[in-house]
Amino acid sequence: MAFDATKKEWSELYAFFRLLAEGNVYAGTPDVKRDENCCLPIAKVQREEHDGTRNYIIGKNEVRIWGENIDKRIPREDFETVANLILQALRETSGNNMTSPDGVEGFLDEIVIYNLEAKTDDRTDLKVAFYNENAPLTGLSIHSRIGPLYPLLDGGRAANFKFEQTGIKFPTPTINKINAFGEEDDVLGRMQMIERLGGVLKYNDVADKIFRSNLSMIDLHAGRMLGEMTRLMWLEGITKVSELTEAVKRLNPLKIKDELITKHGYYDYKVREFLLAIATGMRPAKVYTGIDSAIDGCLFVTGDGELLCYQRAFRQVFADFLFQNTRLEKGSTQKDKYGYLERENGAYYFKLNLKVGLMKR
């Protein structure tokens, strides 16, 4: 009997089966192409299944599936066949849900996989041993352009920045009028109305104390830098992180010397450090110590279904890939609690939310 699952779940399963079928993965370049000089052989994939940790040991023609309740061998070509079926269905399916293609459910029963997404506490989707099965495991997350791209950072209200409303003191009826302006998600409209009425939104702080401390691990002024990037996204309509970084360099909210910006690449460097941190495990509401997490990198599935690997072992390439292929996104104002003037300790503040995702193309 066919069953439905989200395209995100199917995309993760596709990437997993493609790895087992090919037995290798190319390192990716910053512009999302394969590095022809860096093909990484895969000896083993470890994945969390419903019955615990399983090892998928890749042989010349078959994959040995070994775990507490299973020990069997499956031809690698079977994984390739099923991966191709999933890829074709993903391309042909509109919407967020997809029905299992013919033959796929039977294969999943044969290899006893019940969960299309791995359920882990460390946020990895799978772990890979390169070159030989006894090599150290590399924890990877999966991001796919053939499915919905979920954010690298979706921190909810913990990822809000506070901007103090200055310039003029608005009476309560004016505050109410501003907050009632437009649709719920018309954040820009309310920002422009504040400006038209003589108000100024001045960066104040990171709203959540844990996220403030996490960002301070990257730089004591990282909150101001990212807050200004978020503000520019709304006011200027710029979403690409690389373009926002250029805009912040011109604005120079930290008032640092031109030499530090041009010769040392201060803003470019700090933004890359932030992106590496969120790609490898930093979260707004969880204390970040700078110690490496279980996530060592990511598997990125291109629109053509090709797998590319980015990892901390190739740090600069990984950072450049993130810098060139991420954008700021607009989260839900209701869920993330931002986009309105709120009174706090006698002053009014306007919050904006930071959300970072990979670009579809």
Image: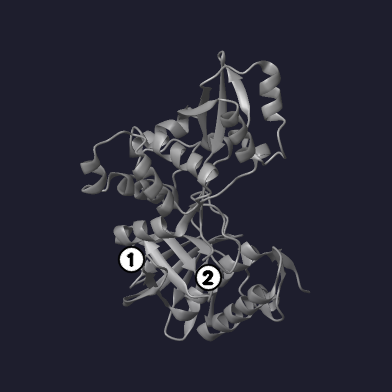
Q: Residues within 10 Å of mark 1 (few under 14, many from 20)?
A: few
Mark 1 vs mark 2: in front: 2
The answer to whether 111 appears left or right of 143 in the picture is: right
Alpha carbons under labels 1 and 2: distance apart: 21 Å
Q: Which residue is mark 1?
A: 135
Disc 1 marks a residue whose amino acid type is Ala
Q: Earlier in the sequence, mark 1 or mark 2?
A: 2
Q: Nearer the viewer, residue 62 or 1?
A: 1
The kind of residue on which mark 2 rests is: Ala
Residue 194 has which mark? none
Residue 84 at x, y = what percent?
59, 81
The N terminus sits in image quarter: bottom right
> Which residue is tagged 2?
15
201 up-or-down from 291: above or below = above
Name the residue: 63% across, 30% down.
Answer: 340
Q: Secondary structure at mark 1?
A: loop
User: Which residue is pictured at 44% across the width and 61% down the height?
Assistant: 298
Q: Position of residue 76 (x, y in %)?
A: 51, 83
Left or right: residue 348 compared with residue 4 = left
- Residue in the foreground of this view, choosing between 349 and 44: 349
Frontmost residue, 247 versus 289: 247
Element under label 2? Answer: helix
Instruction: Locate residue 205, reporting x and y percent.
Output: 46, 28
Q: Is residue 338 visible?
A: no
The local crowd at label 2, few if under 14, some if 14 to 19, many if 20 or more residues have their Cα within 10 Å, is many
Is residue 101 placed above or below 297 in the rendered structure? below
Please name the residue shown 52% across and 70% down the image. 16
Taking depth in this image into account, of 255 and 32 the one nearest to the observer is 255
Percent across and percent down for residue 108 are 65, 73
Residue farthest to the right, as pictured: 1
Query: Compared with residue 292, is residue 255 higher up or lower down, i.e. above or below?
Result: above
Please, which colouring scheme is shown? one colour
